[in-house]
Image (cartoon, rainbow, N blue to C red):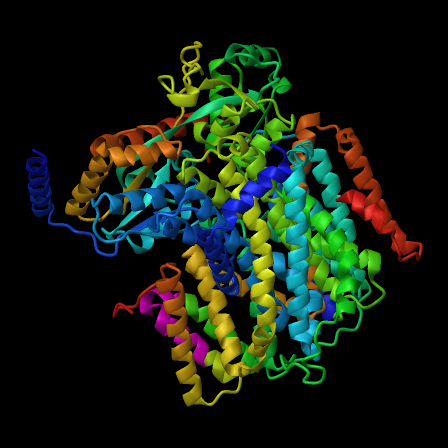
């Protein structure tokens, strides 16, 4: 059966009234749940899984609901990232960089709209790629060995240099601090405890969500309380809608981000947070003329598109080979198993209605996300009209409640506050937080793969340059570091395209 | 006839209820991991089935308490809920492996009450479909010749149960497990990816996580670490024991209760688990989860848990992993 | 001056990281790199960065606003986890929100009303609707 015909049968499944209603409910619920800081897609999906059984939904309907939730919760978190500079989820940190300046200049609704459009473009293009190229892409992703990952991480760190503002040495201190925080916990290679100081809670390392909330939500609220910054948005220009020209202006950035995000999503181990970070830094390297970080639409569109493309991409290895690409897809894999569907290469032949119904519902889910949220952006933007003394205490309490509800640990709350205090001090002394967060994201991938690579070669460093992919990535990294030094700010887009 | 049986059952149930004099209130199942993992599924599936079959009346809630393969939950129970009779905590062989290595803090395996198992998964040894290894003997021979010539990769750290499985194979082959070339991945999924991508030669995984790949012919299983052959898709795979290496690795999934929970509650929970294991609806759900039968509840399970932990302690000491 | 102090702290932190890495007891060499290399390199970067900052400090505009307000929010945040189990989610969260609302210039009565309201809404939302169990206080609320 060729992909088109199969997809049509998929649409027949997905377009039944029940499944349409379920997809809608999933997207709407997901948006609402995702808007809660700390509670991301993984919890949203895990929470509703039992409900699917309670309602005795057929498997394809349940999976359609879960996929809708997954998309919806990805979008919901953007509301507080853009409007309040408070990302509730690690994948959304880059969203704040240009989204919040836009909101401050009174264009919160427009920023939410471009974010929605970016998500739609990223999600839909990724589903198209998935429809026709799922198996070859997964094979390509699996051929990515430890050495290739190392080179990819080096490129990511090289791009991180674009984020440095002010003194370069402070950026490198931030990176080192991020790396140290990431090393807390049991070391995978040897089972040795590092930087845990005997604490059992730290054995599993510092939770990514706690880190994000501490660095950005807690510290931001401390600054706001102190009156050092103000959350007041400009009234001038409010209501300036997103223009068609602006959308066109962002299209190239979105397309680049789609390719990069989708591939990083398909790669096991790298997910939406790595994808959005790389998409932003790469886009900044390519297009920035001093406007990034000050409310450039492209700086918002790139990470948003990459984030959604990566979310879709991470479903590819699960559907094609039954390998979970991220935490959330692991939950969905569990859902498959509960319905006694064995995910894997045989899924498309054994249960085509499930596989293709799910893929068709992703098209519908993405469209619904846009249709549901575009009319609401104005309403969301009114969140800023809530008085500060209700809004910020509420956000703080909700952040802590989210962290607690997911971890059931008071210790985790103390960690979160502790990271908030650290972030407060670092901001005061001018050490940037974004490089710290990015280093944290990339650290384990870099160290684990570096050590795997040298295990394979028995200590020989030549393995790091042993594959064509790794050599290309190393060269790109050299370009990314070297280019600004020779004062030639524009890098041809095609070069980055290869990286994806 | 049917009515008689039903009446009998009802009488029996009410009788046991009277005898135990314990009924849980707001019962809770703690999954000591993030949503989506084995512990989480154990809790959610068991809670659902206990409620659906009517064995437990009030709805059981699942709480996630991630950290250290159960270490955080273990300590939380000791410190804050030592007498809470309404809570059961999921446990698996992986927890015992860490408990044995002192990674659960100052508490030992005698500090909780082991309730019972609801099923087991089994370790398997997988290679890619085009691998040079055809049987377990091929692997052992290669390991004997040069332990570093076989790249082993799995989703756990050195010292975790995923590392223990191949370590036992090396030990059975008379090779020092410390010489193994082991690559630690983040979770079994990534390791399967590395196997299919040809970056590692050998994947010591669990039966449930490789079933899809096995059915599709992407991988070949060299051995299962069970005492008898596993049913279904695994029927063609010989056990390690059959091939002359007595390595067994059941990944038992079960529960424990806090140490000071009342005797009546212990009787209650072991009672419902025994009935659950006998229920055909549960047996079906368990099979769909990729779990195999492992009926062991109460005192027998308590002894088993302590014995296993002691064994792992010896094993860890042998390879120099103990603290 | 600030930069010199930050540099000193970073250098000490880096030295601490290197020292910690060297004290790690590795049972056996499972991989050729081992767990010490990355913390050591990272510690080295911190020492180097800290020294550069100490030797060539730049001007840092450390401005403080009404910092007691931030401090009040911080103290409430630190007490919050300690109160959560003993007095329950609703009471602890209301306390946190009340202090934070005062810090954000609310008058006491509206602050108290909004704090209690916020706590109840979140409890219903997370515990009742999303089925994420939150601690209940002595009165079962």
Q: Is residue C121 left or right of residue A108?
A: left
The segment highlighted magenta reads C82-98
Q: Quadrant of the C terminus of chain A?
A: top right
Vertical side of A208 occupied by C107: above or below: below
Q: Position of residue C45 (x, y in %)?
A: 74, 51
Residue A483 is one of the magenta-drawn residues: no
Which residue is at 22% across, 48% downward? B260
Q: Nearer the viewer, residue A5 or A281?
A: A5
Residue C83 is one of the magenta-drawn residues: yes
Q: Position of residue A418 (x, y in %)?
A: 54, 64
Q: Is residue A302 visible?
A: yes
Which residue is at 40% across, 13% downward? B241
Corner quadrant of residue B52: top left
Which residue is at 78% across, 54% downward? A282
Q: Main secondary structure of the magenta part?
A: helix
The number of discs equals 0
Which residue is at 42% across, 59% downward? A405
């Amino acid at each position: 059966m060729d992909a088109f015909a199969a997809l049509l049968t998929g649409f027949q499944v997905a377009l039944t009234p029940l499944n349409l209603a379920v997809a809608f409910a999933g997207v709407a619920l997901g948006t609402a749940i995702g808007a809660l800081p700390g509670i991301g897609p993984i919890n949203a999906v895990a929470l509703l899984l039992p409900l699917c059984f309670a309602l005795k939904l057929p498997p394809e309907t349940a999976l359609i609901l879960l996929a809708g939730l997954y998309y919806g919760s990805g979008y919901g978190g953007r509301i507080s990232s853009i409007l309040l500079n408070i990302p509730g989820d690690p994948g959304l940190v880059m969203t704040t960089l240009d989204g919040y300046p836009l909101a401050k200049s009174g264009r919160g609704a427009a920023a939410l709209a471009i974010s929605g459009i970016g998500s739609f473009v990223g999600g839909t293009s990724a589903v198209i790629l998935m429809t026709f190229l799922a198996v070859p892409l997964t094979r390509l992703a699996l051929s990515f060995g430890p050495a290739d990952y190392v080179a990819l991480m080096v490129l990511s760190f090289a791009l991180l240099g674009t984020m440095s503002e002010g003194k370069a040495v402070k950026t490198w201190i931030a990176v080192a601090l991020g790396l140290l925080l990431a090393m807390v916990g049991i070391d995978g290679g040897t089972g040795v405890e590092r930087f845990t100081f005997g604490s059992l809670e730290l054995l599993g390392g510092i939770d990514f969500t706690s880190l994000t909330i501490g660095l950005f939500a807690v510290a931001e609220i401390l600054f706001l309380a102190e009156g050092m910054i103000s959350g007041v948005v400009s009234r001038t220009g409010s209501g300036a809608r997103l223009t068609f020209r602006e959308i066109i202006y962002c299209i190239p950035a979105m397309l680049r981000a789609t390719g990069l995000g989708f591939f990083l999503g398909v790669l096991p181990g790298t997910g939406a947070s790595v994808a959005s970070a790389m998409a932003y830094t790469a886009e900044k390297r390519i297009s920035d003329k001093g406007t990034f970080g000050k409310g450039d639409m492209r700086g918002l569109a790139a990470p948003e598109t990459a984030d959604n493309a990566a979310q879709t991409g991470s479903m590819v290895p699960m559907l094609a080979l039954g390998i979970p690409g991220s935490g959330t897809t692991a939950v969905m894999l569990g859902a498959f198993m509960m319905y006694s569907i064995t995910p894997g290469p045989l899924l498309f032949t054994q249960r085509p209605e499930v596989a293709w119904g799910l893929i068709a519902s992703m098209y519908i889910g993405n469209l619904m996300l846009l249709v549901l949220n575009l009319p609401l952006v104005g309403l969301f933007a009114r969140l800023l009209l809530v008085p500060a003394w209700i809004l910020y205490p509420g956000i703080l309490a909700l952040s802590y409640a989210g962290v607690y509800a997911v971890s059931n640990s008071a210790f985790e709350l103390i960690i979160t506050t502790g990271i908030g205090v650290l972030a407060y001090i670092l901001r005061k002394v001018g050490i940037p937080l974004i490089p710290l967060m990015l280093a944290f994201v990339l650290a384990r991938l870099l160290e684990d793969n570096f050590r795997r690579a040298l295990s394979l070669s028995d200590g020989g460093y030549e393995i790091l340059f042993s594959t064509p992919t790794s050599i290309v990535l190393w060269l790109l990294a050299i370009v990314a570091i070297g280019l600004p030094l020779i004062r030639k700010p524009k890098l041809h887009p095609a070069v980055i395209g290869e990286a994806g | 006839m049917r009515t008689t049986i039903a009446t009998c059952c009802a009488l029996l149930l009410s009788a046991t209820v009277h005898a135990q004099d314990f009924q849980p209130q707001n019962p809770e199942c703690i999954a000591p991991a993030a949503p989506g993992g084995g512990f989480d599924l154990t809790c959610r599936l068991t809670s659902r089935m206990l409620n659906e079959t009517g064995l437990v009346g009030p709805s059981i809630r699942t709480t996630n308490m991630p950290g250290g393969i159960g270490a955080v939950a273990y300590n939380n129970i000791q410190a804050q809920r030592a007498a809470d009779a309404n809570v059961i905590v999921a446990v698996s062989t992986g927890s015992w492996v860490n408990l044995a290595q002192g990674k659960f803090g100052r508490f030992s395996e005698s500090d909780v009450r082991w309730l019972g198992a609801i099923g087991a998964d089994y370790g398997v040894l997988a290679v890619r479909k085009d691998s040079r290894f055809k049987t377990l003997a091929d692997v052992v021979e290669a390991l004997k010749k040069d332990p570093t010539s076989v790249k082993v990769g799995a989703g756990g750290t050195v010292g975790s149960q995923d590392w223990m499985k191949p370590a036992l194979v090396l030990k059975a082959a008379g090779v020092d497990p410390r010489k193994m070339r082991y690559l630690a991945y983040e979770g079994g999924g990534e390791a399967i990816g590395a196997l299919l991508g040809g970056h590692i030669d050998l994947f010591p995984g669990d039966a449930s996580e490789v079933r899809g790949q096995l059915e599709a012919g992407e991988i070949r299983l060299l051995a299962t670490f069970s005492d008898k052959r596993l049913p279904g898709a695994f029927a063609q795979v010989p056990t390690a024991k059959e091939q002359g290496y007595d390595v067994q690795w059941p990944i038992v999934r079960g529960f424990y209760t806090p140490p000071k929970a009342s005797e009546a509650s212990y009787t209650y929970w072991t009672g419902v688990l025994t009935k659950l294991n006998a229920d055909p609806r549960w047996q079906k759900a368990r099979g769909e989860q990729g779990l195999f039968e492992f009926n062991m509840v109460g005192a027998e399970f308590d002894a088993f848990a302590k014995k296993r932990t002691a064994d792992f302690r010896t094993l860890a000491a042998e390879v120099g992993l103990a603290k | 001056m600030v930069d010199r102090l930050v540099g000193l702290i970073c250098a000490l932190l880096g030295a601490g990281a290197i020292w910690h890495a060297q004290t790690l007891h590795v049972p056996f060499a499972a991989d050729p790199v081992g767990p010490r290399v990355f913390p050591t390199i990272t510690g080295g970067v911190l020492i180097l960065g800290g020294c550069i900052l100490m030797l060539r400090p730049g001007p840092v505009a450390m401005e403080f606003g009404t910092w007691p307000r931030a401090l009040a929010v911080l103290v409430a945040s630190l007490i919050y986890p300690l109160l959560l189990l003993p007095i329950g989610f609703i009471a602890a969260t209301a306390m946190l929100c009340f202090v934070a609302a005062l810090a954000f210039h609310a008058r006491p009565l509206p602050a108290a009303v909004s704090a209690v309201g916020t706590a109840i809404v979140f409890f219903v939302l997370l515990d009742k609707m999303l089925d994420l169990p939150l601690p209940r206080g002595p009165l079962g609320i």
